[in-house]
Amino acid sequence: MSATTQAMRVRFAPSPTGYLHIGGARTVLFNWLVARQANGQFILRIEDTDRSRHVEDSVQKIFDDLRWLGLDWDEGPEIGGDFGPYYQSQRLDIYHEHIDRLIQGGCAYYALETPEQLQAMREAAEKSKGGFRYPRPDPIPTIEQGEAARSAGQPVVVRFKMPDEAITVVDDILGEVTLASDQFEDFVIQKSDMFPTYHLACVVDDALMGITHVFRGQEHLMNTPKHIALQKALGFSTPRYGHLSVIFNPDGSKMSKRDKEKAIKQGVAPPEIDVHDFRSAGYLPEAVLNFISLLGWSPGNDIERFALDEMVALFRVDRIGKTNARFDRDKLLAFNTDWSTRVSPTRLLVAFKDFLNIHEDTPAMMREADDAILARMLSLCEGFRTFADVIKKTGFLFVADESIEFMPKAVKKVLQKKEGAGLAMLMQLLPKIESLSDWSGEKIEQLLSDICEESGEKLGNVAQPIRVAITGSTVSPSIHETLAFLGRDRTLTRIRRCLAMHS
């Protein structure tokens, strides 16, 4: 049955080298969307044959990232299916069988060059100012020579014989892309450690798992002719391909995990690159999914805000663009601010608790707070950009009264400026606050309003000294709600302590 008539089966096949990159998340999303729209199957496969790059806990990190985004899989690890195993490291016998078929059929051969010999070839190509292309041996080593060399402990690899002809990739996004034969070389399909390379394992698994459509990043476009040649040699059908645009930073550089390393070397805060970065920075998965869906795709009609189920209804492959996408962090922040008001209070609370559990700087008292307190915090900070803003604005509530640290800038700007006007205001406020028996937000707001009217001061000149006294900074939710939340006794304790320390 051809790829166009059988049920759609798509896959995402990450290498476990760390957390899921945000570009990989977009690839997952697009595959997931086309599968859901077509009532097809989305398969997760772990490509863990490159043991030199394998990071042991990365597989679980990828699972966690996908589940945080809400992108489930129909077949794969922890789910099962009829086409497993879904870890390539558990499929070595399958790959060896297909490699042997290629060798016996004359489509692949043992290559006996040592790493030193290959390096010498590359250096010679550099000196001649030409690009290095592996030269096919003449004569090609026999099977017997290759097996004998491998038995003797030599670093033998297996290379595929690329056909001497142009190969055309029929791409659902880019159209037809033809590569001439002089752009190809015989590439390795089995390394000296007997593990298959990405190319061989990918082609075999796509065929045996019944993959009908492959949507992946444009960085794989140059690999696709190799895969088509392998498919033909093995008698496999070719799935339909679609290569997604590259994601760039606003400055035009490619968005890469190396951006974090570069930032750290420069002594600046590293940018969010991996899905986990955005999760621990306090973004909602709804906002992240909404935003990355628009990196290279548009539903038309100027629609930009939609939930995952709405994406399924709107998504069309023919609306995926060819041009590279730009990752606009300001726009993502705007999306997240909007989504923080769009989701239900119950959903927001669940997401906030997840953030508190994984965020490294969460105060222990805040992590242990009950749902009612956390919900109130969210309500006080309505319109926040990320959950990190909620911690910043309300973290003082979870600090012992005697441990409040006063920011020097806040003390100088609010309390000591104009010959200590702020401290003087606190002195005037203290007895009036002490006399307030009904400690509700409404009564506190009314008290502060009355004080402003009596003194002729603006609310800021009244509220800011209180804010500095109880938080140590100039940032908090509305002052009356903040005091109501903190409580009468703690408010008075903090104001008295502030006066004692700075008068």
Image: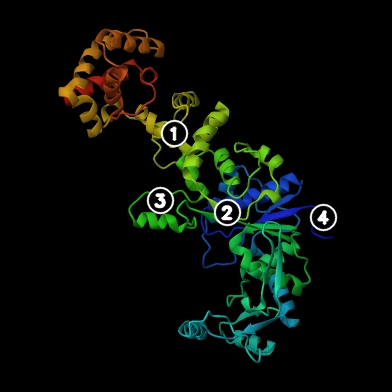
Q: Residue at x 64, y 86 (%)?
A: 146
Mark 3 vs 1: CB contact within 8 A: no
Mark number for residue 6?
Answer: 4
- Which of 425 and 143 lies nearest the eye of the viewer? 425
Per the model, the C-alpha gap separating discs 3 and 2 is 19 Å
Q: Quadrant of the C terminus?
A: top left
- Disc 4 residue type? Gln
**Residue 272's x, y, as percent?**
46, 48
Residue carrying label 1: 367
Report crowding for label 1: few under 14, some 14 to 19, many 20 or more residues within 10 A (C-alpha): some
113 shown above or below 258: below
Q: Earlier in the sequence, mark 3 or mark 4?
A: 4
How far apart marks 2 and 1 lie (CA) works out to 31 Å
User: Dot 4, crowdedness within 10 Å: few (<14), some or many (≥20)?
Assistant: few
Asked if residue 318 is positioned above or below residue 331 in the image, the reply reads below
Q: Is residue 375 visible?
A: yes
Q: Which residue type does callout 1 highlight?
A: Arg
Give the residue type at disc 3: Pro
